[in-house]
Amino acid sequence: MSIARFWRETPRRYNLGGSKCSICSTVYFPPRSVCPTCTHHRRSIGKMQPLQLCGEGEVFSFSILQDAAEGFEMQVPYVLALVKTVEGPMLTGQIVDVDPAEVEIGMPVHAMFRKLREEGRAGVIHYGYKFAPSTAEDRRPRRGGSNEPSPVTEPPEGSRAPA
Ligand SMILES: [Zn+2]
């Protein structure tokens, strides 16, 4: 299965795997095997449960950047934000599908998987999460995948990552 096919067919939430401490209920992303919040860390060993972040959150802070990092395929200016997820962990990511001037603190957003960059010679394509503004429609529980947005860009044939 190609990488492109994989991302298309995998619900985006599957890709935000974190963990939750079953003692104090703190959620971590990326996942942790020991809870640093619990007073006695060792108590949390074996009590960390996998938890998929739903990808919904809100803009906690953001910067509008005028210079694209080399190798990254972004149009400038672009917005880099710290997003507070509904589960608690903070994620850093680009805000897309919105005029940078319209981004504001507290704006509801949701994670989506997008092409981040492509390495020239190897043609290796990296995917990661970005965030887009959520509408009321987005925030309703989803049924099926019919309204799942497809990635804006997909790898051209022949530039697949090694298996
Ligand atoms: Zn804990």
Image (spheres, rainbow, N blue to C red):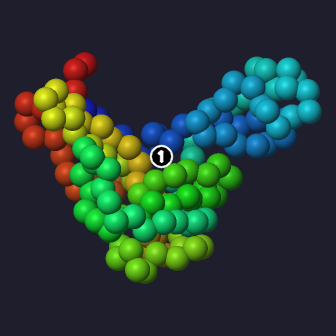
Residue closer to the observer: 42 or 25: 42
Along the viewing direction, whichever of 114 and 65 lies nearer the viewer: 65
Query: Residue at the location (7% across, 36% down)?
Result: 157
The x, y position of residue 73, in whole percent, is 24, 52
Q: Residues within 10 Å of mark 1 (few under 14, many from 20)?
A: some
Q: In the image, what residue type sits under mark 1? A: Arg
Q: State the residue lying farthest toward the right.
A: 39
Residue 155: image location, x then y, percent: 16, 41
In the picture provided, is 25 more to the left or to the right than 162?
Answer: right
Considering the image in quadrants, where does the N terminus appear?
top left
Tell me, yes or no, if residue 37 can be seen here. Answer: yes
Quadrant of residue 61 within the rendered picture = bottom right
* Label 1 residue near ligand 1, CB within 8 Å: no
Name the foreground residue: 74 vs 114: 74
Q: How many marks?
A: 1
Residue 109 seen anywhere in this rendered image of the structure: no
From the viewer's perspective, is 122 left or right of 132? left
Circle 1 residue: 13
Closer-to-camera residue (70/75): 70
Q: Residue at x 25, y 44 (%)?
A: 71
Q: Which residue corresponds to the image point at 43% horizontal and 80% vertical from the top-left?
A: 102
